[in-house]
Image: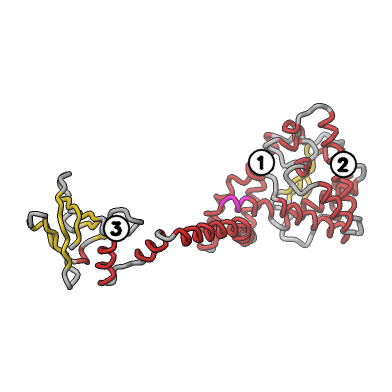
Amino acid sequence: MIAGTYYDGESSAQTLATMRTGADGSLQLLAVDSRHLGQCSLAEVTVSPRIGNTPRYIDLPDGGRFETTDNDAIDQWLAAFGRDSGNRFLNFLESHTKFVLASVILVALFCWWMVSYGIPGASKVVAYQLPATVLDHSSETTLALLDRSLLSESKLSDVRQQQLHDLFAPYLPSDSEYTFRVLLRDGGEIGANAFALPDGTLVFTDQMVELVDSDEELLAVLGHEIGHVVERHSLRQTLQGSTVAVIAVLVVGDASAFGDLFAALPTYIISSAYSRDFERDADSYAFEFLKANDLPPTLFADVMRKMMAKHQALLSEGIEEDELPSQDPNSDSWLDYLSSHPPSEERIRQAEQAQ
């Protein structure tokens, strides 16, 4: 017999009772005064799972409920008729601290693996499945938003703009799935900046053009931004922040069905910096790009030194660190590399070693 409390399901009244089990799995409920309270088969009841030593509930087909703290007896009864469902194993784990600690460690390791490798890997797979229409739409929307808020028409002379377009044209990949083009804009508050949109649109601000000493240094920036496009960094960064969507695309297998996911991509591209790994990838691409075009990777190092000097000059003018263009929440400026990206000295050293 299993002692417990019976509730008839119609009132809040409690009745001390015992539950007797039969050889066929049936159960009979009797009050302490031997009154018959109910009878049914095991198949007709629902038994709550065991959670530590908390009370168990047996819900009866007539709406009644039997509650007991004799968990071991309930487990034995269920196990005898193949209704264990793993509850005893779970209770064993819960009752042994070392197994609980081991489980916590395993869960922590799994979460670390997912964040470090699982989600980035899945995001990369999905990013390369996305159709061209998603890339085009997200890029057009992003550029329109930037032109309305942060950017304005380039103030460089028409002659200078044409010189820059003539400079870049021979270096834009022609045998690519992307339609690469360079646009010039006045960066305003975001200052010296260059960024890439998913469809291959590369935007250079006037301030970036004015920062460098030679046009060849702009080619180093060009190679870096092309690297972001080819590796689909902006899409992968967005997807890494949308884990559920990534899993859905992988399961369904139809990336085009999730085009709406990228409705927020413009804001994400503008407000978020790339991860350090993505920046290192783009740096490496730039080094190979320069060498393939018979240009020294040290051009990239020269640009980084100018960015560092610009950064220090702004600080010397009394501008607080959090007021610099690099810290603007709406900016993905090259100045931002001085803080959230790989250390500038490290990047300069890598460029020099890439010779």
**Residue positioned 72% across, 42% down in the render:** 332
Q: In this figure, which residue is indicated by the disc labeled 3?
A: 48
Q: Please give the label number shown on residue 306.
A: 2
Q: Residue at x 48, y 60 (%)?
A: 98
Q: Secondary structure at mark 3?
A: loop
Among the two numbered marks 3 and 1 on one chain, the one whose residue lies closer to the N terminus: 3
* Left or right: residue 48 compared with residue 195: left
The amino acid beneath tag 2 is: Lys
Q: Residue 216, position in %: x, y?
A: 90, 49
Residue at mark 1: 271
In this view, the residue in front, 323 or 207, is: 323
Q: Which residue is depicted at the point 62% across and 54% down?
A: 133
Q: CA distance from mark 1 to mark 2?
A: 24 Å
Q: Report the magenta residues as a range.
A: 238-242
Front disc: 1 or 2: 2
Category of crowding for the residue at label 2, using alpha-carbon neighbours closer than 10 angstroms: few (below 14), some (14–19), many (at least 20):
some
Name the image quarter holding the C terminus. bottom right
Task: Point out the image quarter for the N terminus.
Answer: bottom left
In front here: 226 or 136? 226
Circle 1 sits in a helix, a strand or a loop, which is it?
helix
- The amino acid type of the residue labelled 1 equals Ser
